[in-house]
Image (tube, grey):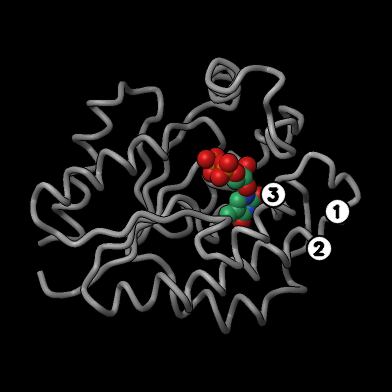
Amino acid sequence: MKNGAFVTFEGIDGCGKSTQLERAADWLETEGFPVLRTHEPGGTPIGRKIRRVLLDPANRKLCPDSELLLYLADRIQHLQEVILPAKASGTLVLCDRFHDSAVAYQGYGRGLDLTATASIVQNHIIPNLPDLTLWLDLPPKMALERLKQLRGANMLDRLDSETPGFFQRAQAGFAELAQANPERFVRLDGTSDIETLHQQVVACFQDRILS
Ligand code: TYD
């Protein structure tokens, strides 16, 4: 395989995507492929500054539209500075969240009208969509339980303290995105154990990226 690829891992907070990304990256490296692990928000130095603003629980005054534009600013910077050059050099770029998260969280979760940002998305995101998106589908109740165990009830950041309804809507958003983009999306059952999921992720890479 000479070409690089851009693969994203998506799902609501606590769905297990970061664990699967790490396992997939480890496996690909063992197989001898050049791999870059990255994430949004915060995949560049500028993006890390944006991330601090986005996830600071003190920023209650952050307007929903400002929030959306900050996610997009982070994404454009990440694409130009990291994702596209790495993919062009033949690297497999594995990214924890990408634009589907904005559609699910800001669009479906917050109910924002995304048409105001359509031209930004058309110019910067649509030409650079992932080659494959792995969606870990886990019911919001189970995801929230996992998060509480993982981080402790008092250590939730601004987004983690959203209402359960927010995550239900975001979850419905991911489901609609998966249905509307079957050529790019693969749904994985997030209730499966880590090893079973890893084998399914490996099979996806073999079928869709490495063959
Ligand atoms: P993070 O700590 O990276 O969580 P996770 O491991 O679940 O990705 O926090 C990122 C948060 O930002 C997460 O709650 C999802 C949210 N988010 C959006 O709302 N819109 C976006 O476009 C992106 C990329 C993330």
Secondary structure under badge 2? helix
Which quadrant: the C terminus? bottom left
Q: Which residue does the numbered mark 1 point to in the structure image? A: 62
Q: Is mark 2 within 8 Å of ligand 1?
A: no
Secondary structure under badge 1? loop
Quadrant of residue 69 within the rendered picture? bottom right
The first of marks 1 and 3 along the sequence is 1
Residue type at mark 1?
Answer: Leu
The first of marks 2 and 3 along the sequence is 2
Q: Nearer the viewer, residue 37 or 165?
A: 37
Say whether residue 104 is visible: no
Q: CA distance from mark 2 to mark 3?
A: 16 Å
Q: Which residue does the numbered mark 3 point to in the structure image? A: 108
Q: CA distance from mark 1 to mark 3?
A: 18 Å
Left/right placement of residue 134 relative to residue 112 reads left
Q: Position of residue 178 (x, y in %)?
A: 46, 51
Q: CA distance from mark 2 to mark 1?
A: 7 Å
Residue type at mark 2?
Answer: Ser
Left/right placement of residue 201 relative to residue 63 reads left
